[in-house]
Each structure stands twice: as structure tokens, then as C-alpha cells.
Amino acid sequence: MPMKYSYNAGYWIVLTVLVGVACSCSDAPLADDNQPRVQIVVSSLELNYGLVPTNETSEQSIEITNSFSFGRTLSGTINISGNGFSIIKGGEPFNLAPGESRAVVVRFKPQSLSSYTGSLTISHNGLNVSNPIVITLKGGEEKTGPSAILVDPSSLDFGSTQVGQSPTKIVTITNPPNSLLDLIGTITVAGTGFSVVSGDGQYDLAPGRSRSVTIKFAPGLVGSFSGSITIVHNASDTVSPFTVTLKGTGATRVVTKISVTPTSVDFGTVLLGQLVQRDLTISNPIGSTEALNLTVSLASGSTGYTLSGGGSFSLIPGETRTVTVTFSASQKGLYTGSLKITHNATNVSSPLVVALRGEKTSSIVLSVSPASINFGTILVGDHSEQGVTIGNALNSTGKLIGSFDIIGSGFSIVSGSGAYDLAPGQSITLTVRFLPTTNSSYSGSVRVFNNGTSVSNPIFISLSGSGQWKTSISVSTTLFDFGTVVVGQSAEQSLTFTNSSSSIQTISGTVIFGITSNGFSFTQGGGSYSLPPGQTRTVKVRFSPQSSGSHGGELQIWHSAQNFSNPVRIPMQAYGQLRAVTLSASPAFISFGGVRTGQTLDRTITISNSSASTGVLTGSIGMNGSGFSIVSGMGNYSLNPGQSTVVTVRFSPINKISYSASLQIVHNATNIFSPATVPLSGTGQ
């Protein structure tokens, strides 16, 4: 029976059997009619990876198949050659039974921009094609340079730069519009004092595109500096690399500083007839390299102020001078102005301005009594009141004018208006009330705004007090979470609630469930109760699901306490789960391949009860079919959740035929039908 083979567009080797036609095929020599023939099929004769970025990977595979071999094993070896290509799977020697396949995965990892070629060689005992089979490997693409590279400018001179300064310049690299290919390469900078701000590293410029490289020159010393930008490229008109020279000179840094303390002056409120002076310190700090030349004067419009120690003067590095500003206004009012300092310092702009502020006022003396109020401990729901007197002293020279308010919860003003206007010798009394609503400490203040000349504005009268519950309840938990409970079983949780020992009365009420609380029941503490101060009640709740799924409800504690809303609500959540047993068998099927007659081959199957099961997996293990036998693990089994058993199956062919059978697993699992089967197959050779 002569044979021929060919390769189609999908790169498969196709074998065609011609019955009754005589031919002689050198690529597929015929064995004797009584000998089996080995035939090999390869899925592709070429792997082309195309362009892959440098140091990245791409993977492709081919498949080797033993096809139409009439019971004979296809054997062989696989080798690879060519830089950049490697086998990551399936490269070991192979023995394939009829119908079996082997996948070979080849990885391409280029190290540079160039073309890569290689080959995958398959040596084999197949009779239908030549030996070996060679599969071509290709990847990458070698790029040639464009017609030109433009670099502008070709050199950079930063000139003289003071130490501590860091000017920048830009070099532009361009791939001309008439280029045919991308301009590719790398950019690096070298040289002490020079560094890249942006634009270095690898680049890839299409025709007409540019790359800007920003260079910084930061001399650390006085003297000359040189460096270079190295541009590696693939241009065809210019030698690579292209070098841009860098140079610059570090010059002595000229530093002149000025320091002024303080930076603004507030004279506050000053009584008529009083003079207030403030000093300002001006210095040329150590570290300056030049003299500080400056002029100090009052700015235009600075009415009410006078200056001494000003004018024009110079300070050498480290020298200090003090000038004095006097607030001398003779009439009431707010006065603003500024001190102007013109200078040659380099650390701040000139002129430097120091703001001046002051207010002239008459003498108004405010008195407050008491300075603080402590209401002590008050039962929640009750209140206490005390008075505060605000007065304008008899010797004041003007009206005391202002307003007041309360800061802090629990306190309020119940008499006295929110504003006041008091002539010398007059006063006003405020009534402050403390009404606690919780069992806690309270603090606050009466805030008194005023125009007094002897006190701050505003002044604060501190308030304090404590609230105490008549009755107070505390509960040990805010949630009942029973988790997952198997239907037919139950779980129990408990809480305690207490009439606080600080209470002065008995609390009473009832403990009940909300109307949707199916599956929950009291085992202790439900119903009516009465708790004197300091006593505790325990409530126990049982969850007994009758069905699967989520269950929810609410425990309600009705009470007469003051500190909680009524009732106290405790959410309950749980999940009912049906009893479940899960069986798994691994592997799900076994192919023993080809085994010589008279010989044996063993394989194992693991049978498991999932750790998530809620019951014991039981049953028995048997065999259905000839040619196979159970070596170990046969018969009855019992597996707790998470346990497994191993069954060893042996294939013992006595004829050169195909065998099939199944392992029979009788079980009580709920996830699959019983019996579960594991198909077995093999071929006698």
C-alpha cells in the first residue's frame, strides 16, 4: 500500500493512503506488510515571531503527533539552535503512543535590534517523512540608519556661572522628514558639574520627529568644567556616536544677605498719652561675601509713628544695627504704617517692608465676678442657675461696650441681653443655667466681648459641671452573629445588661424578639424583668435553622433607663446550611498509553472528601472492564472532611489491542451521582 505526504497552508503534514496504486516513495519507506508503520505529524514547519522589544519575550508552540501508527510508539529527540531561541516546555525525548501528542513551546528573547534565525530539529522513527524534520525559527528585524541625523547645537558653552547656581540649556536631536526609517539609539551625559534634567536614555524617532535633551550646569567649585553628551545612533550619514561638547566656568558666588527681626510690629492698644517703642534688628549675616548697603525710612502715610537710627548706612558681613520705632499718636484710633528698607541684598527683593500697626484708646476698666462657675453634680433632667456680673469701673474714661454668648453644650443664659452698653460705674448681671442631658462631665464658658483697655478681648468665664443619670443601662454586645449552622443543629449566644451602679432607681421592662426572628428562641432571660442599681440580667438565645439560607432577626430590650433610646435593639444574623458531602477524584481519567503484552504499568487515583463537607464520605471502590485491576485501595472506605484515600490501578495487557475500563466509586456524596466513574484506557503492544 504506497503512501505520499505533503504540507498544506497550515503547516500540517498530511498523509494520504492510496489503495491499489503501486509507487516507490523514498521519504516514506514501507515496512513489511506484517509490521506496523509509524507516522509523524508536525503542526508547523516555521515559527515567525516578528518584531519583539529588546529583552522582552514571545512564545509560540508546535505539536508533534503519532498518527495512524497501528499500535507502534513514535519516539524521538528535539534539539534547538540559534541565538535568542530556547525551549521552555516539551524539549525532552518523547515516546508517543498512537494518537498521543506532544506540545513543544519555544521562547524568543532578543538582546539587540537585529534579525534572528534558528531551527528546531526533530529526530524520529516515523516512516512517512524524512528524518530529521527541521522547523525554521525567525524573529526580529535589523533596522538600518535613516539618511541623516541633525543635532542642534553641536556644542554647549554655559560661560561663567556662580557657584551655587544651576542654569540649563537644550540640545535638540532630529530625524529629518526625508528619512526612510526610524532614528534609534541612546543618549548619555558625562562630566563633573553637568547632569541631565530630561531627555536622556533610549530614543526612537520617526522621520520628522525630535527629542529635546535638557542639560544642567551646577559648578560646585571655582574653575573650568568640561563634559559631553554621547548620542549613539543608527544614522547612515554620520559616524556613531555623535558627541556634543559641554563646557562652563564656575565663578565665585557673590552673596549679600539681609535679616530683619521682627518682620512686622503690632503695638497693640495703647492709652492716650502713653508712648510705646519697638526695636528692629537689621543684620548682614555671616556667610555674605559683600557689604550690605541700605536705607531705612518710614513709608509715606505712616502717621503716628517716628523713627530713630534710620537713614543710609552699610553693614559688613556679620554686622548688626538696631533701629527704633515709636508709636506716638495723640488721638484715639487705629494707625497703620510701614518701615521701608531699600537694600542691595540678594536673598530678598528690595525694598523690604515691615508693617506697623497700633491703636490709641481711652482707659476703660472692665470687671467680672465670679471669674469661673462650678455647678457641681446635677441629676439628668434637673437644672441649676448662677449669676455673673459684668461692670465698668467708676474711674473709667469711656463707655464699656460689648456683647456675650455661651460656648459649650449643657449651658445657657436665661436672663440678661446679648449686648451691653455701660457707663462708668454701671454693671449688668447674667443668669447662667446648667441642664445636663447625659451622665458625663461638662465644660464651657461665657465669652465676653469688650472694648476694655485693661483686659483681653474677649475674656472667658469658665463653666463646669457634671450630669448623673437617675437610671443608666449598659449592654455587653451590639450584635448576635451565629455564623453558619447546619440544619438540624443549633448554636447559642448570650448577652448581659446591667443597671449601672451609679443609678439611683430600679429599671424595669421586657426582653422580646422582633416579629421576623424565625429560627431564634430564648433559653434564658426572656420576658419581663426588674433590676435594682448595680444588678445584671443574662439573656441566652438559641439559633436552630429549619432551612438553608440567611436568617435574621432582632432582640429588643425595653427599659426605663435614661441613657439609651427605647428599646435597645440587638441585630441577630445567622446562616442555615444543609448537610453536604463533596467527593472528588483526581485524575478524572487515566490513559496508560502503550504497554507491551506480558508487562504491567501502575497509576494512582486520589479520592477525597472536601474539607468544606459537613459529613463523612462513605462507599466502596470496584473495577469494571478487563485488562485492568486494583492493586490497593479496593473495597469499602470512610473519609472524614478533608481526608483522602489513594487507589492504585494496574494495566496488564495480554493482547495487542486497545483496552478500556472504568474505576467504579460508590458513594454518599451530594455533589455528583453514584457511582462515580474514572475512565481507564490503554493499548497492548
Image (spheres, rainbow, N blue to C red):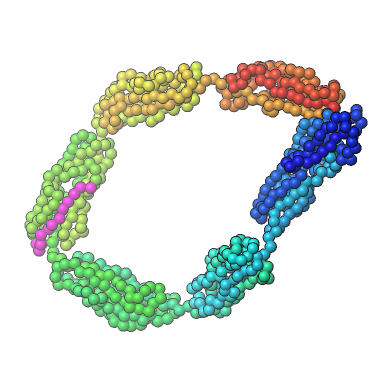
Q: Give the quarter of the image for residue 175.
A: bottom right
Q: Specify whether 35 is left or right of 639.
A: right
Residue at 33% across / 30% down in the picture? 474
Q: Nearer the viewer, residue 124 or 537?
A: 124
Whether residue 401 is in magenta: the answer is: yes
Percent x, y of residue 329: 17, 72
Q: Specify whether 671 is left or right of 415.
A: right
Q: Give the quarter of the image for residue 632.
A: top right
Q: Is residue 448 visible?
A: yes
Residue most toward the bottom?
Answer: 313
Percent x, y of residue 139: 71, 52
Q: Nearer the viewer, residue 158 or 381?
A: 158
Q: Is residue 201 visible?
A: no
Residue at 21% across / 59% down in the picture? 456
Q: Specify whether 461 is left or right of 345.
A: left
Q: Which residues are magenta?
A: 395-407
Q: Nearer the viewer, residue 505 or 516?
A: 516
Which secondary structure dominates the residues rendered in magenta?
Answer: strand
On screen, residue 397 above or below 99: below
Residue at 25% across / 27% down in the picture? 505
Percent x, y of residue 397: 10, 63
Q: Quadrant of the N terminus?
A: top right
Q: Specify whether 249 is left or right of 330.
A: right
Whether residue 441 is in magenta: the answer is: no
Residue most toward the right?
Answer: 32
